[in-house]
Amino acid sequence: MSESVVIVGAGHAAGQAAISLRQGGWQGSISIVGEEPYPPYQRPPLSKKFLAGELPLERLYLRPETFYAEHDIDLRLGSRITAIDREAHRLTLGDGGELAYDKLILATGSRVRRLALPGGELTGVHYLRNIDDVLALQEGFEPGARLVIIGAGYIGLEVAAVAVKSGLVVTVLEAADRVMGRVVSPEVSAFYQREHTRAGVRLRLETPPGTRIGGEGRVSSVIEGDGREHRAELVLIGIGVLPVTELAEAAGLDCDNGIVVDEYCRTADPDILAIGDCTNHPNALLGRRLRLESVHNAQEQAKTAARTLLGRLEPYADVPWFWSDQYDLKLQIAGLGDPGCRRVIRGEPGERSFAVFHCGDDGRLVAVEAINSPREFMLGRKLIAAGARLDPAELADSGNDFKALAETALG
């Protein structure tokens, strides 16, 4: 296996792919080309412990920077690929140089969705996607500073939790009628709304359209569409991300809300694979194609792609899972719920430890949301992967031991 592999992107997926290739015995050259000046790192802590100053920069890295040279991995940071010549198997670099490849892995990830609104270009308006974004936001983290967050998804609420604990005055604006509405059930939304309000965060839901940012040169306020004004020294916009597919599209690869790949992370070009946030991939467990934004997906697709290049075909079909830390609350989600599912709550939200189980019409467990309930999360993942069925009535009965119910369902 003396062929060369070039990995475009230097995020978690890229780093894991290179690591897995070397661990699997790949003898050829491996190059990672990334635009950021940092080696592959973990993104989830950015809006949590790293923002809070509880995690040093080096602890974000998947491996120490010296690891790559020690394992003969060419790490090209601060570099950008501008074009792929599939016929010649050559890449064009931003500085005009070229790089040849035998096999190519696209790990281009995602970028923040930008909000077009008046005043969005003012100093003090931030987005959060990478290390430099956090460092810039931290400069304004002073007790008493006023922060307005537009968007009540994972990023917005995680930053709100860190900020209010740091002594900032925090207001969150959300156009929907509940927080994290795209990713959690109404029951979990209601719980987090109470927790953030209790912590001192001001939540504004169903905000009218027409929001704008006021200030001269620097942000001074955020004005809702109905004229309600919130004074602010800082603004964070967190309204989701978009897959980075321009390079793949220009090369003629199929893209549809992500780079289209099969269960082995292969594109239609036999010499090009794609992994992570940028991919639209099939999931046999769910019976459909989807694009996921999660570190677990990035990591496991990277391992799948490495096995594919090593000639060990194993389809990627994991149960999707996600997590979020806010205050002393750990939210863990496995599977993908559906509005038509029956939802069963076990535990007491008032005690800040409970789980919401999503059961299909046939009793099959399709998703679980667990707050400070690791056992329910872990067993729930196993049940979902096994396609196990649970009696919703038995599940709802707190007198029934969940572990016993799970073991029975798993056979």
Image (tube, rainbow, N blue to C red):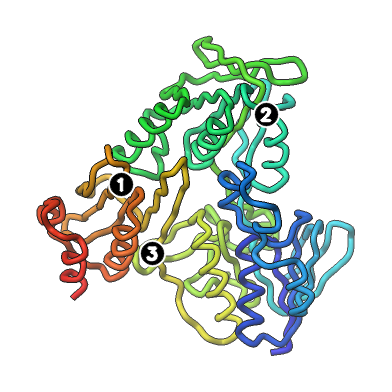
Q: Give yes or no for contact between labels 3 and 1 (Cβ–Cβ under 8 Å).
A: no
SS at mark 1 in the image: strand
Q: Residue furthest bottom?
A: 1
Q: Quadrant of residue 15?
A: bottom right
Q: In the rendering, at what x and y percent does residue 43 appear?
A: 60, 53
Q: Residue furthest top?
A: 227
Residue at position x 40%, y 28% from top?
A: 198
Tell me, for residue 180, which label it has, or none: none
Q: How many marks?
A: 3
State the separation of the CA atoms marked 1 and 2: 35 Å
Q: In the rendering, at what x and y percent does residue 247 appear?
A: 69, 58
State the separation of the CA atoms marked 3 and 1: 23 Å
SS at mark 3 in the image: loop
* Left or right position of 322 against 142: left
Which residue position holds label 1? 353
Tell me, for residue 319, which label it has, or none: 3
Say what amino acid the circle numbered 2 marks: Val
Quarter of the N terminus within the rendering? bottom right
Q: Residues within 10 Å of mark 1 (few under 14, many from 20)?
A: some
Q: In the rendering, at what x and y percent does residue 269 appear?
A: 62, 73
Say what amino acid the circle numbered 3 marks: Val
For marks 3 and 1 on the same chain, the one whose residue lies earlier in the sequence: 3
Residue at position x 50%, y 27% from top?
A: 172
Which residue position holds label 2? 125
For marks 3 and 2 on the same chain, the one whose residue lies earlier in the sequence: 2
| Residue nearest the viewer, comparing 315 with 12 | 12
